[in-house]
Amino acid sequence: SEVKGTDANMSYDEKVYTVTITVSSSGNELVPDVEVTDQNGEPARILFTNGYEAPVEPEPEPITVGLTGIKHLVSDSDDVTLANTEFEFRLTGSGDTELLATSDGAGRFAFEIELAEAGTYEYTVEEVIPAEGDEGYIEGMAYDTWFYRVTINVTEVDGQLSAQTEIKDLQDVSCQVLEFTNYYTATVPLLVP
């Protein structure tokens, strides 16, 4: 029989063989006669077959990478302020990702991106500019056309994912936050004499 080892990924053969050696003499020579039988007493050839299954590394838990931004509004009217106006922002990029975020009353907005494997992910963040007549369009609003490029490098060490985020503006300058500024000028009706 085979002596089992300690490798947990190895399956050891449990077959048992009986080897009978009968020695007879023929003149001045000894002649061995070897007979091998299996567990059932049937004639057999000694053959042990082991199996090996490579250990499966568990998939790392996905990580969530957050991006935050701030909207500034320069307005000449108390009717149009950050507190009463929502602005929408779009993140697009790697893996056909498209996420939308809306600013709160203080102008803050955020994206959360879930990433499940190591690699480099690239995104663009821009303000959604509504066309005239669309919902959210404000007459007299000059929308920010600036956009940012975001690169997220995800690495895996010992089954754990970690991420480093780099944000660059249109001029390839590194930034810490996504920042947009809109300008609002109240429209003054024309007086016809």
Image: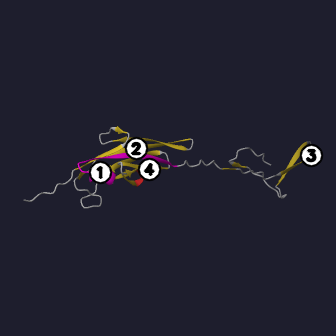
- Label 1 element class: loop
Q: Nearer the viewer, mark 2 or mark 1?
A: 1
Which stretch appears magenta? 62-85
Rendered image: mark on residue 25? 3
Tag 4: residue type? Glu
Nearest the eye: 121 or 22: 121
- Label 2 element class: strand
Tag 1: residue type? Thr
Which badge, 4 or 2, comes first in the chain's sequence?
A: 4
User: Does 80 appear in magenta?
Assistant: yes
Placement of 155 over or under 18, stated as above or below: above
Q: Nearer the viewer, mark 3 or mark 4?
A: 4
| Position of residue 187 measured from the top left corner of the image (x, y, whole percent) | 19, 54
Which badge, 2 or 1, comes first in the chain's sequence?
A: 1
Tag 3: residue type? Ser
Q: Is residue 157 something one can see in this rendering?
A: yes
Which badge, 4 or 1, comes first in the chain's sequence?
A: 1
Nearest the eye: 90 or 181: 181
Which badge, 2 or 3, comes first in the chain's sequence?
A: 3
Residue shown at the point (49%, 45%) measured from the top left: 118
- Residue position marked by numbered label 1 in the rendering: 81
Cα–Cα gap, marks 4 and 1 = 26 Å
Asked if the residue at tag 4 contacts the one at tag 3, i.e. Cβ–Cβ closer than 8 Å, the answer is no
> Dot 1, how many residues are within 10 Å of its Cα: few (below 14), some (14-19), or many (20+)?
some
User: Does 193 appear in magenta?
Assistant: no
Which badge, 3 or 1, comes first in the chain's sequence?
A: 3
Which quarter of the figure is the C terminus placed in? Answer: bottom left
Rendered image: mark on residue 112? 4
Asked if the residue at tag 1 contacts the one at tag 4, i.e. Cβ–Cβ closer than 8 Å, the answer is no
